[in-house]
Image: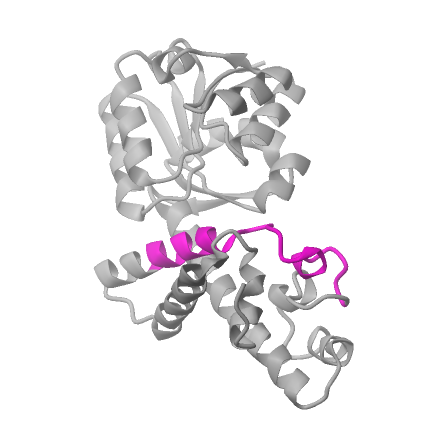
Amino acid sequence: MTSIGFIGLGNMGNPMAANLVDAGHKVTGFDLAVDVMDVARGNGVDIAGSVVEASAGKEVVITMLPAGTHVLSVYDEVMEEAMPGTLFIDCSTIDVASARKAHQLAGAAEMLSIDAPVSGGVGGAKAATLTFMAGGEQSAFDKAEPVLDAMAGRIVYCGDAGAGQSAKICNNMILGISMIGVGEAFVLAEKLGLSHQALFDVASTSSGQCWSINTYCPVPGPVPTSPANNGYKPGFAVDLMLKDLKLAQEAAQKSGAITPLGAEATQLYSLFSALGNGNMDFSGIIEFMRGSQK
């Protein structure tokens, strides 16, 4: 049993913390929202009154927060109170520069740290099938892996500090771009009188196959579990995809990478969100291709 502090008990954090409890760990959690702490308490998580209380005396501290500024603020606040040698695992999706700064703060306090953003959404968090992309020193990763295993379907060590975040934003840029391409293809098929099922049967088994077709097809019917069959309820919301695309563009600008399709995808999801669709599943971008509005 490992003593774990868990900071950030939202849609992802709560089921992740619950899986840690189910695996036999002692989890103490904190969130600014009282209602989510009530849910966590019902899942067997001990509730702390502050981030410092959640972190003090713990072997591991996990953060699942909206942005880099939140992660750095928590790290600044808890480092002096944390037990020497505590392992900090940040599962948030944040900018690479903030992830590396978080590692620096942990290192200066003689703590271990990894950045370990996730893929798999709320469904993966509940089912303990998340993919973790980890960055940091090998020794820190080796210590983190048994903890992550209680929440994971797959754990990938990506390299040094910030590598997990780098892998996450590159992966999601691919996803955002590919979903737009798939949406365009299905809209073209509609205009040409080709059925959704016929295009799916061809593309899902030939050179057009990709996750956006085979697993998350953006039209009702071919993949019964896709959000298209449930009014595009997320899933993975447009605004979350937009956040990741913006992080990818920020990283591209800072690194000098040329990402024209990533830039165009960011613009399209920005427009779709501005039309009031930010809480729709990101696969609903097909409605934008059709010229439909919410």
Is residue 198 visible to us here? yes
Magenta-span inclusion, residue 223: yes
Q: Picture coordinates of residue 135 (x, y %)?
A: 40, 41
Q: Is residue 18 left or right of residue 258?
A: right
Residue at left 24%, top 62%? 253
Residue 281, percent across and down? Answer: 57, 56
Quadrant holding the N terminus: top right
Q: Between residues 283 and 141, which one lies in front from this camera angle?
A: 283
Quadrant of residue 61 within the rendered picture:
top left
Query: In terms of image quadrants, where is residue 214?
Result: bottom right
The residue under the point 72% across, 75% down is 200
Magenta stretch encompasses residue 83: no
* Residue furthest to the front: 294
Q: Foreground residue, 292 or 179?
A: 292
Q: Nearer the viewer, residue 155 or 62?
A: 62
Judging depth in this view, the residue of 27 and 292 nearest the camera is 292
Residue at 39% x, 52% y is 243
Q: Is residue 154 visible?
A: no
Q: Quick one: quadrant of the C terminus?
A: bottom right
Disc tally is 0
Left of 179 or right of it: where is 42?
A: right
- Left or right: where does residue 41 sit relative to residue 162? right
Residue 121 x/y as whole percent: 57, 45
Q: Which residues are magenta?
A: 222-248
Residue at image location 56% in from the left, 18% down from the top: 38
